[in-house]
Amino acid sequence: MSIKELRQKSAADLNGHLVELQKEQFALRMQKVTGQMTKTHEIRRVRREIARVKMLLGAAKQ
């Protein structure tokens, strides 16, 4: 999801999206450990999107 789309979401929506991303990140880590991972670039994409959401949540507090 792009940063523009994330900026349009409320804080509650961002928190929900963050939880989904963390679950996805956990699933990807498990795939990597078990050797089932085919799309290794997904780990990087999810990690960066988590960072974007956390940045927006931090900016919303100020």
Image (tube, rainbow, N blue to C red):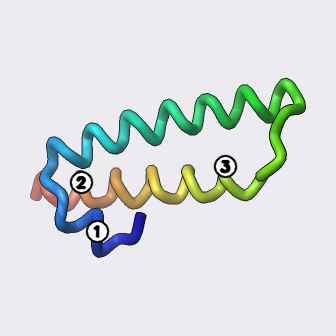
Mark 1–mark 2 CB contact (< 8 Å):
no
Dot 1 amino acid type: Glu
Dot 3 amino acid type: Ile
Q: Secondary structure at mark 2?
A: helix
Q: Position of residue 12 (x, y in %)?
A: 15, 42
- Distance CA(mark 1)–CA(mark 3): 21 Å
Q: Residue at x 67, y 53 (%)?
A: 42
Name the residue carrying label 3: 43
Quadrant in the picture for residue 41: bottom right
Q: Secondary structure at mark 3?
A: helix
Badge 2 crowding class, 10 Å Cα cut-off, few under 14, some 14 to 19, many 20 or more, is few
Dot 2 amino acid type: Gly
Q: Position of residue 31 (x, y in %)?
A: 76, 31
Q: Earlier in the sequence, mark 1 or mark 2?
A: 1
In the displayed structure, does residue 60 sit left or right of residue 37? left
Q: Earlier in the sequence, mark 1 or mark 3?
A: 1
Query: Disc 1 or disc 2, which is closer to the eye?
Result: 1
Q: Residue furthest bottom?
A: 4
Name the residue carrying label 1: 5
Badge 1 crowding class, 10 Å Cα cut-off, few under 14, some 14 to 19, many 20 or more, is few
Q: Quick check: 22 above or below 42? A: above
Q: Quadrant of the N terminus?
A: bottom left
Q: Residue at x 22, y 67 (%)?
A: 7
Q: Residue furthest right?
A: 35
Labelled disc at residue 55: none
For the residue pair 61 and 40, the one nearer the viewer reads as 40
Name the residue carrying label 2: 58
